[in-house]
Amino acid sequence: MKAKEMMDKEFIYVSKDDSIEKVSIKMEESKRFTAPVLDENMKLEGWITSFNITKGLREGKTLISEVMDPVENILSIKEDEAAKNTVIEISKHKLISVPIINDDNQVIGVSRSVDVVDSMSSLYDIKVSKIYKAMEKELRGVSWDELMEASAKISTRTTGVKITAEEYEKNIQKSTFGEAIWATGGLEKFFAGLISVGEIVIARKVGRARR
Amino acid sequence: MKAKEMMDKEFIYVSKDDSIEKVSIKMEESKRFTAPVLDENMKLEGWITSFNITKGLREGKTLISEVMDPVENILSIKEDEAAKNTVIEISKHKLISVPIINDDNQVIGVSRSVDVVDSMSSLYDIKVSKIYKAMEKELRGVSWDELMEASAKISTRTTGVKITAEEYEKNIQKSTFGEAIWATGGLEKFFAGLISVGEIVIARKVGRARR
């Protein structure tokens, strides 16, 4: 995934000659706490957050140019960089948003922390049953029912709560990868469970092949 | 993971009798775009964002009570709810933060979208080698070298680029789960690769046991 695929599609931008009052209304109406300050060629000249605005209003300033953060302080991400870099920068510097720029240094969008949450939670939202479908497809010669039986067995062993293959199947239709990770206590434990299931069904498959 | 484990530890809160000017300075200094308005028992009475502040300053209002969002419009999360619920609410309503409350309806913290990004990116940041360590531990009787050899084989087959077991081992020491998912093209494909590896080593293990 590239940086440009994880952007605020309705980002706002302002000019350094705009009045602070006008910009404050624009930010309130669009519900944006930050905005890049761009020149007529869409190049970055500065950065505005609600903090620059409240300070400017309090101190009786009038123009964005009087309150904006200078361009040299602004961290930006190139549109074709890995989206992961946006995540890392936002997380490391506790940023609420970063501008995304093209090769001509024009701002083409803004990635907000809420956009990152959106993208990441869609990963979490993959149904566990989809992972099992991938497993079934990969393990030619192992049936879906065998996978469910093995999983119910491992689940019963790990949790101490008896569960049937049918109940297990119902659970994974509903639950997501995110829920599974939180439920099992982490990514490695989730994998360990899947690997135990794999071990059972593969051992059976190998056994059948040797008969 | 519970909601209370994913909170802003330095959250700020204000009183409805505070002046807008004083609160605006507090928000600028602490770099917080939002704050719960609490009574003397830490119970929620309202909610403030930078938008309420800029509007108030522009319109010459003086007290927080004149500009705050009323308590009935505020979505909150109970401290013992799954952290996942915070993620879902922030993502669904594009919130920048939500208050976390205890059983007595007292606000004990605020979860911001940047806190969510932080927690989620720590999942992404797990080294792939850790997942392999879990695999090695689970698959008693399969050695680390066998895992690396099988993985190099699957990787060569999938990508068409020849890689040795040693090179593969070096790669997974550096790369994270997040990178692996982006590199393989998604969670299911990453799993499918791991399962193919599992199939090779388990088949060998079963073969040895039968000898």
Image (spheres, coloured by chain):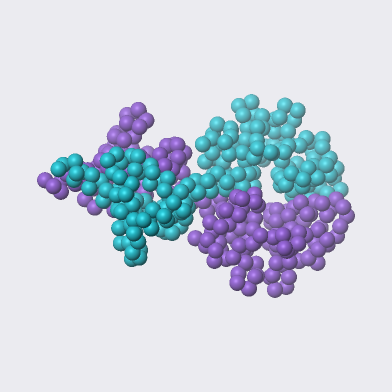
Chain colours: A purple, B cyan
Looking at the picture, how far across and down is residue B71, in whole percent? Answer: 69, 36
Given residues A120 and A187, the one toward you in this image is A187
> What is the quadrant of residue A180 in the picture?
top left
> Is residue B25 left or right of A132 when viewed as pictured?
right
Residue that appears at 16% across and 42% down: B210
Given residues B166 and A199, the one toward you in this image is B166
Image height of B175 relative to B137, above or below: below
> Is residue A209 left or right of B49 when viewed as pictured?
left
> Is residue B42 left or right of A122 when viewed as pictured?
right
Image height of B9 relative to A119, above or below: above
Residue that appears at 26% across and 51% down: B200
Query: How many numbered marks does the figure carry?
Result: 0
Residue B184 appears in view: yes
Residue that appears at 37% across and 30% down: A159
Residue that appears at 35% across and 32% down: A158
Given residues A1 and A93, the one toward you in this image is A93
